[in-house]
Image (cartoon, rainbow, N blue to C red):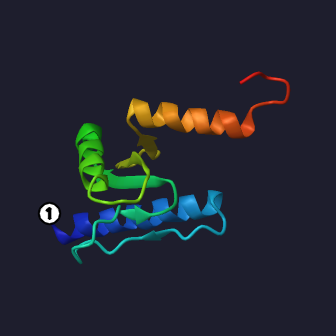
Amino acid sequence: MGKSQRDKGKRWEREFAAMLRDVMPGADIYRSQQGDGAHQPDVVCPLFWPECKCGKAVSVRAALRQAQADSTLSSAPAWVVAAIKDDRKPPWVAMPMDDWLEMVAVLWRETRPRGVEQ
């Protein structure tokens, strides 16, 4: 991988971290410094283990496999996500169905309208 591709990846990680900081004010969110041997996601944040990928044709499945493998090396509980940015396209996020359903269940418990049974 060339320097320009690595730089593009770093920019996308910083951009993704900024997006999370916008919607999670006060949370400690930052781009991790991979390479020091510590097992960290691309962007350190509460609740999630993001694997950030950008490029012409990103493999979502490979990104999710990498995030799942890396997250198992950590004791921090987190939902695994792949944060994808295809060249000149809007970014998006993918996650495993089991994690997504668990997240929906948590959100439903926290935001369920009054009068709706459990």
Q: Position of residue 41 (x, y in %)?
A: 35, 61
Q: Is residue 60 left or right of residue 93?
A: left
- Amino acid at the residue labelled 1: Met
- Mark 1 Cα-neighbour bin, 10 Å: few <14, some 14–19, many ≥20: few
Q: Position of residue 31 (x, y in %)?
A: 41, 70
Q: Residue furthest right?
A: 115
Taking the spot 47% from the left edge, 59% from the top edge, the residue there is: 16
Q: Position of residue 86 (x, y in %)?
A: 35, 46
Q: Position of residue 97 (x, y in %)?
A: 41, 30
Taking the spot 40% from the left edge, 54% from the top edge, the residue there is: 49
Q: In the rendered image, which residue does mark 1 sit on?
A: 1
Query: Where 55 sits versus 111, above or below?
Result: below
Taking the spot 55% from the left edge, 71% from the top edge, the residue there is: 28
Assign the N terminus to one quadrant of the image.
bottom left
Q: Secondary structure at mark 1?
A: loop
Q: Is residue 22 left or right of residue 47?
A: right
Residue 24 appears in which quarter of the rendering? Answer: bottom right
Q: Residue furthest bottom?
A: 36
Q: Is residue 106 left or right of residue 43?
A: right
Assign the C terminus to one quadrant of the image.
top right
Q: Nearer the viewer, residue 63 or 103?
A: 103
Taking the spot 60% from the left edge, 67% from the top edge, the residue there is: 27
The mark total stands at: 1
Q: Is residue 90 left or right of residue 5?
A: right
Query: Where 71 sits versus 96, above or below?
Result: below
Q: Residue furthest left?
A: 1
Q: Nearer the viewer, residue 56 or 95?
A: 95
Q: Nearer the viewer, residue 118 or 91?
A: 118
